Structure formats: C-alpha cells, structure tokens
Amino acid sequence: MALSMDLRERVVAAVKTEGMSRRAAAKRFGVSYSAAIEWVKLDEETGSVAPRKVGGSKPKKLSGAWRDWLIERCRKQAFTLRGLVAELAERGLEVDYRSVWEFVHAEGLSYKKRRWSRPSRIAPT
C-alpha cells in the first residue's frame, strides 16, 4: 500500500530544505530508510514523489516476426521445447523454456514423438 503524498513530501522536504540525511528523515517520520531514499531519488528523477505504477504486464517476446517464424518452424519439422529455446537463442532471442511452452500450448502446436501403439501382450495375472 502506498503511503500518503503528504508524508512523502514532508520526508523529501526534510532532506532537501532542512539538510537532514535520508536516514534521519526516515527515523523522524517513522518510515523505512529505503522508503526515504527511494522518495528522494524519485523526486530528483521526476520532480514528484507520486508512487510509480504498480503491476501491469510485459509485452511477450514471442510476437510479431518471432511468432511467425516459430509457427512456421514448428509446422515444418519435429521439435522439442528445449530445441526451440536453443534455436531462438542462436537467432538472437533469449527466452526461457516456460515462454516457449506457453506459446506452443496457446497456438495449439504439438509434436508427438511416437505414434500410438498397442498395449503390451503380457496379460496381468
């Protein structure tokens, strides 16, 4: 939970106008040292102590031209997920196993290593 703007502004003002250290200002206002350090840094960088955006999603690496290449590659010949990770790395895109798995799963691409075979002839006793 973000602390109030008023508190943030008072901590930064104590550091900037009163010449207090960040640690002393943190102790005076009952906040953590790291919060005081971060608020002063934020004020210096942006001119505001407003909290930064929290959360959100990162754009997927396997999109656009990478997506098109990967779909074509998967349809062209047999593959393993680790093999695809290695091929992408050779082409300059560092992705992890999980990203490739999620992509292959979402696109409905799969490769069965063996065809279905009949059960064993040995009957249970």
Image: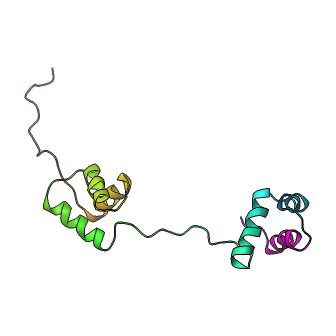
Where is residue 17? Give x, y as percent: 89, 74
- At horizontal 90% and vertical 68% (from top left) the residue drawn is 19
Where is residue 120? Give x, y as percent: 10, 31
Where is residue 52? Give x, y as percent: 65, 72
- At horizontal 40% and vertical 67% (from top left) the residue drawn is 60
Where is residue 21? Give x, y as percent: 86, 62
> Quarter of the image holding residue 74?
bottom left
Q: Is residue 55 magenta?
A: no
User: Horizontally, is 28 left or right of 72 in the view?
Assistant: right
User: Horizontally, is 52 left or right of 65 in the view?
Assistant: right
Residue nearest the viewer, comparing 18 with 74: 18
- At horizontal 38% and vertical 54% (from top left) the residue drawn is 96
Q: Pick the quarter of the image with the N terminus.
A: bottom right
- Classified by dominant secondary structure, the portion drawn in magenta counts as helix
Q: Residue furthest bottom?
A: 47
Q: Pick the quarter of the image with the C terminus.
A: top left
Q: Is residue 11 magenta?
A: yes
User: Horizontally, is 62 left or right of 74 in the view?
Assistant: right
> Quarter of the image holding residue 104?
bottom left
Residue nearest the viewer, comparing 115 with 92: 92
> Quarter of the image holding residue 61?
bottom left
Magenta segment boundaries in residue numbering? 1-18
